[in-house]
Amino acid sequence: MRNFLKFFFNKWWRPILFWFACCLIFILSEIFRNRLFGNIAFPLFGIGLLVVLVSSIYLFTQKKWLTGLLGLGIFGGTIFAFLFYAIAMFWIEQERPDEWAKNLKIPTNIQLDNPVDIGFDEHKPDSITNKLVKQTDFQLYNSFQPGLYEFDFWTNKIESGTIYLKAFEITQEYALSTDRLPKSSSVKVYNPTDSIKKFGTTSHFTIYEGDWGQPYASRFEVWFKPDNGGKERKLFNKNYKIEGWMR
């Protein structure tokens, strides 16, 4: 390993060539917008930057000032360019309308509920808080903006574990917000009795696909992950008409 590192860093251009290859992969991932490709490309981009920085420090210790400064300039310039790109893309995305749900049709042959409004104060109406539930049930709530939601889930005997949501646009079976939804909707549960008990979120989660004023049909599935390492399983599902969060 030591011989490899010495071989790699002794020539100032080798780390720069590696950095260039990492940047090229990152640029291609941004062009093709492939999720798997992007998950590999971004960490690789970071490694390429780190390699250039380590190379510069090494060159300084070897009193190779010019090549060390070159590497340091590449490192700083790349950071500046990336921040500029990230800020520019953020504002472009904010201004660009999300038309993902624009042409989706809402089916008329299925049971489709509307989320209950709870608004800014997150106050649930008496019809929900005083609701007598005698069987497993699920209720979705609109939070203070379209695309932001909370939920309650009623169930009887269940071992210690975590429930979380999966959501799908119904007509195309498109999985919604897969990167964040399971974690942001997670709730710890445990009910050793046969009596129905309510569990629910204490903060909102986000459905990113779509935009305000573009409702579409979605299926919310409640999944359970046992603390004992057992197999995850689906407990319940229910259909709702929702909107995505305006970016």
Image: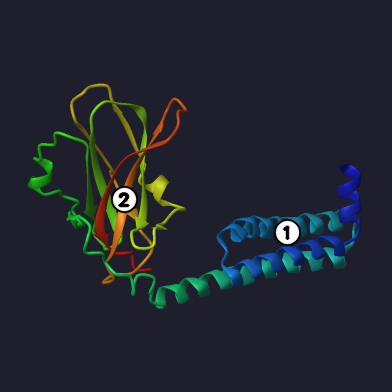
Q: Is residue 100 visible?
A: yes
From the viewer's perspective, is the residue at label 2 or at label 1 nearer? 2
Q: Nearer the viewer, residue 203 or 198?
A: 198
**Residue 128 versus residue 34 in the image, above or below:** above
Q: Quadrant of residue 25?
A: bottom right
Gap in angstroms between the C-alphas marked 2 and 1: 40 Å
List x then y, in percent, for residue 147.
30, 61
Q: Is residue 72 visible?
A: no
Could you say whether the residue bearing mark 2 is in a helix, strand or loop?
A: strand
Q: Is residue 59 left or right of residue 208?
A: right
At a point 39% along the width and 71% down the height, the residue shown is 100
The residue carrying pointer 1 sits among few (fewer than 14), some (14 to 19) or many (20 or more) residues within 10 Å by Cα, namely many
Q: Label 2 sits on what residue type?
A: Phe
**Residue 101 versus residue 178 in the image, above or below:** below
Q: Is residue 149 left or right of residue 173?
A: left
Total marks drawn? 2
Q: Is residue 208 left or right of residue 229?
A: left
Q: Label 1 sits on what residue type?
A: Gly
Q: Nearer the viewer, residue 187 or 3?
A: 187
Determine which residue is flagged by label 2. Answer: 220
List x then y, in percent, for residue 80.
63, 70
Q: Which of the two discs, 2 and 1, labels the residue nearer the N terminus?
A: 1
Determine which residue is flagged by label 1. Answer: 48
At a point 25% along the width and 64% down the height, the residue shown is 107
